[in-house]
Image (tube, helix red, strand yellow):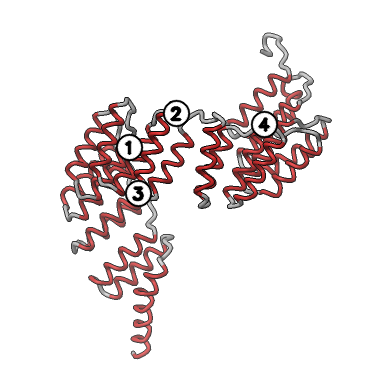
Amino acid sequence: MIKRGIAPNVVTLNMIVDGCCREGDIVLAFELIKNFSVIFGSWIEPNCVTYNSLINGLCKAGDAAVGERVLREDMRKWGIKPNLRTYATLVDGFSKQWKMDEALRLFNEMLDMGFCPNSTVYNSLINCFLKQGYVEYAWCLLSSMIDARAFPDHITYSILVEGCLRNGFVKEAFQCHQMMRDEALIRDVVSHNILINYLCKHGKIKDAKILIANMITSGFFPDSITYTTLIDGCCRECGVDDALQIYEGMVKYDQKPNLVTYNTIINGLCREDSIDVARFVMEEMIRAGLDADVFTYNTLINSYCRKENFDGAFCLYFQMRRLGIMETESTYNTLMNFLCKSGFIELAKDFLMEMLDRGILPDQITYTILITLFSRNCSTNEVVELHDFLVLRGVMPDEDTYNCIVSPLLEREKVHLTDL
C-alpha cells in the first residue's frame, strides 16, 4: 500500500490491531496504536473501534483490569467516549474471571451513562451468578432484564437451564426449558441435551427417552451429542445391549458416530468384560475413518489387565507406541499395578523409568500403587528408597499411603538405629 502511495487510514489500523489481539499479541497491538503514525508516516488517531478491539483482546487474555485501565486512561487521553460494546466487553471479561463486584460496578456505570444493556450483557452476569451458586440473584437479574425490555434469548435460557441443574434446582431448570418452548425460543438441541445429560447421569433413562421423543415432536432431531449421552447412560444403567440399540438408531438416522460415541460403547463393553466385542467395535471405528486415541487404548488395556491377560494388554501398549499415541499416567499406572500384582517387580521398575524418560511425571496414584505393592514384596530399605526416589522427582506423596506405610517404616528404622 505504502509503496503504491496508498495511505493507510484508521480502518487499516483497526484491522491490524484486531488481528494482533486475535493472535494474542497484545503488546504489538499497544505498540501499533502508540507508534502507528511514526511507522507509516501518516497521522492517524485511534477511535472507539480501535480500543474496543484492544479491550476485547485483553479480556480474552484474562486481563479485564488492564482493559478497564485502557478505558480510564488511554481512551480519555484521546477524548474517545466508550460505547455499549466497550462496557459489554468489560462486563463479560470480569464475569468470566468471576470478579462479580467489578462486573456489577461497570454494569451500573453503563446504566448511569444512559446505555441500555442488551441480552449479551445480561447473559454474562447471569452466567457468572449461576457459576458462583447465586441462583436467586440470577433469577432477579432475569426479571430486571425483562423489565428493561432486553428480552431473554435462547442463550439466556440455556445458561439458566445448565446453571440451575449444576446448583441442584432441577424443577427450575425444567421450568426454564418450558418457558423456552412457550416463547418459541428453542433454536437448537442444546437445552434438550443439557437436560438429557442430567437425566442420564442420575439414572433416569426412561425420562431421558421421553424428553427425546418430545424433542422430535417439536421438530428437533437428536444430534451426535444427544445419542452419545444416551448411549453412555444406557451403558451405566441398562447394559450395553440397550446402548447398542441406541447406536443402531443413530446410524439409521444418519447421525455419524464420533470418537466419543465409540469410546463410550467400548468403555461400557469393557465394564461388562466383553473385551472381544470391544476390540471389534474399535476395528469398526477405524474402518469408519476414526483413529483410536489414548482413552480407547487405556480402556482396553485396563480391561485386559483386570482379566490378567498379559499378552493382550502389552500387545495394545506396543501398538500405541508404534502408532505414536502418547501414553498417560493412567496407562503406566495400570500396567505397573498389573506387573507388581503379578510379581514382576523389576519390570515395574523399568516401566517407572520409562515413564520418567518419556517426560510423564508419576502422580499420587503411581505413588500409592508402587509403595503399597513394594511394601508387600520388598525390604524396608527398598520401600524407603522408592519413596525418596519419587519425592526427589517431584511426586507429591499420597498422605494416607505415606502415613500407613512409609512413616511407620521410618519410625521403625529410627528405633532400630537408636538401639544400635
Q: Nearer the viewer, residue 65 or 325?
A: 65
Give the residue number, with chain letter if any, for mark 4: 29
Q: Position of residue 53 (x, y in %)?
A: 67, 30
Q: Position of residue 420 (x, y in %)?
A: 33, 90
Label 3, label 4: how many angstroms apart (C-alpha)? 38 Å
Label 2, label 1: how many angstroms apart (C-alpha)? 25 Å
* Label 3 secondary element: loop
Label 4, label 1: how many angstroms apart (C-alpha)? 42 Å
| Quarter of the rendering occupied by the N terminus | top right
Q: Please tell me which residue is depicted at 20% across the width and 40% down the height of the picture.
A: 279
Give the residue number, with chain letter if any, for mark 2: 218
Q: Is residue 101 above or below residue 13?
A: below
Q: Nearer the viewer, mark 4 or mark 2?
A: 2
**Badge 2 or badge 1: first in the primary sequence:** 2
| Left or right placement of residue 346 versus residue 102 in this view | left
Q: Residues at badges 3 and 4 in contact (C-beta under 8 Å)?
A: no
Q: Please state which amino acid type lies under the numbered disc 4.
A: Ala
Which circle marks residue 261 in the picture? 1
Q: Please tell me which residue is depicted at 35% across the width and 35% down the height of the picture.
A: 227
Q: Please state which amino acid type lies under the numbered disc 3.
A: Thr
Give the residue number, with chain letter if any, for mark 3: 328
Residue lying farthest to the bottom in this orientation? 419
**Badge 2 or badge 3: first in the primary sequence:** 2
Q: Please tell me which residue is depicted at 30% across the width and 49% down the height of the picture.
A: 237
* Label 4 secondary element: helix
Q: Please state which amino acid type lies under the numbered disc 1.
A: Thr
